[in-house]
Image (cartoon, rainbow, N blue to C red):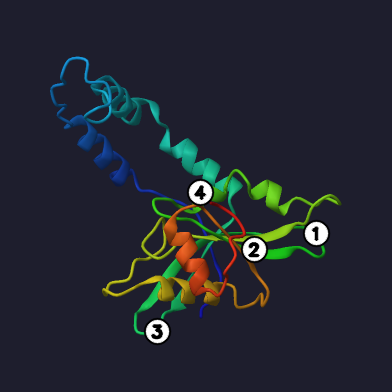
Amino acid sequence: MSTEQPFKITVSDDQIDLLRRKLDLCVFPDELEDSGTCYGPPLADMRRLVDYWKTGFDWRAQEATFNSELPQFTRDIEVAGFETLNVHYVHQTSKAVNAIPLLFVHGWPGSFLEVSKILPLLTAVSPDHPSFHVVALSLPGYGFSQAPSKKGFRVAQHAEVCVSILAKWPRTLVMKTPEQVGHKLMLALGYNLKLGGG
């Protein structure tokens, strides 16, 4: 396993321009009268969303916020029967002396960004509640983690990636989001109780 490498989100101008060109080419369907949401989102809502992504959303500002608020890293991890994968994750340590290592697992659909709102609460030092060292990874194939190139990458392989990242902490809690992916991954890691999520 390689050492931890700092990571910053840097989406190229070409990718942003490509998205804008795709949005410019969007062809909207006709809409039945008084259909509401029976056949999907109302046409007015879709037009508004497309216009927002074309002219209102400032990706560079959002990218700067992610990079300033979330300490991100990558690590190359060997997965048995598969290639070495470059895995992305947020790693925020607490200043508390006895902070507990905690793995935050996103679900599907989801991403590492699900941890952003609670990260300051989890790492805060307080006499009233425990503090945590938090690792919130992008599961392989999600976010900025490399996807496997061979079929058959299942829950057991995701668990292997988690174990590799957390090898330096022998006692780690697992917090997951409510989706099935997170729960199955917890079971593969040997946890029978839900420590977070639904």
Q: Residue 145 is drawn in which quadrant?
A: bottom left
Which residue is the site of mark 2? 102
Q: Nearer the viewer, residue 124 or 198?
A: 198
Q: Earlier in the sequence, mark 1 or mark 3?
A: 3
Q: Nearer the viewer, residue 138 or 110?
A: 110
Disc 4: which residue: 113
Would residue 87 appear left or right of 24 to someone viewing this image?
right
Q: Which residue is mark 1?
A: 96
Label for residue 50? none
**Residues marked 4 and 2 touching at CB (< 8 Å):** no
Q: Please state the horizontal and vertical placement of residue 35, each as a whole percent of the image.
A: 22, 20
* Dot 4 alpha-carbon crowd within 10 angstroms: few under 14, some 14 to 19, many 20 or more: some
Above or below, 46 relative to 72: above
Mark 2 neighbour class, 10 Å CA radius: few under 14, some 14 to 19, many 20 or more = many
Label 1's element?
Answer: loop
Which of marks 2 and 1 precedes in the sequence? 1
Q: Closer to the camera: disc 1 or disc 2?
A: 2
Mark 1 to mark 2: distance in Å? 14 Å
Q: Secondary structure at mark 3?
A: loop
Mark with earlier residue (4, 1): 1
Mark 4 vs mark 2: in front? 2
Q: Which residue reaches farthest bottom? A: 81
Tell me the kind of residue under disc 2: Leu
Query: Which secondary structure lies at badge 2?
Result: strand
* Circle 1/circle 2 CB separation < 8 Å: no
* Amino acid type assigned to the residue bearing label 3 in the image: Ala
Q: Name the residue located 86 percent from the left edge and 52 percent from the top edge.
A: 127
Circle 3: is it few (<14), some (14-19), or many (20+) Cα within 10 Å?
Answer: few
Q: CA distance from mark 4 to mark 3?
A: 28 Å
Residue 28 in view in this figure: yes
Residue type, label 4? Leu
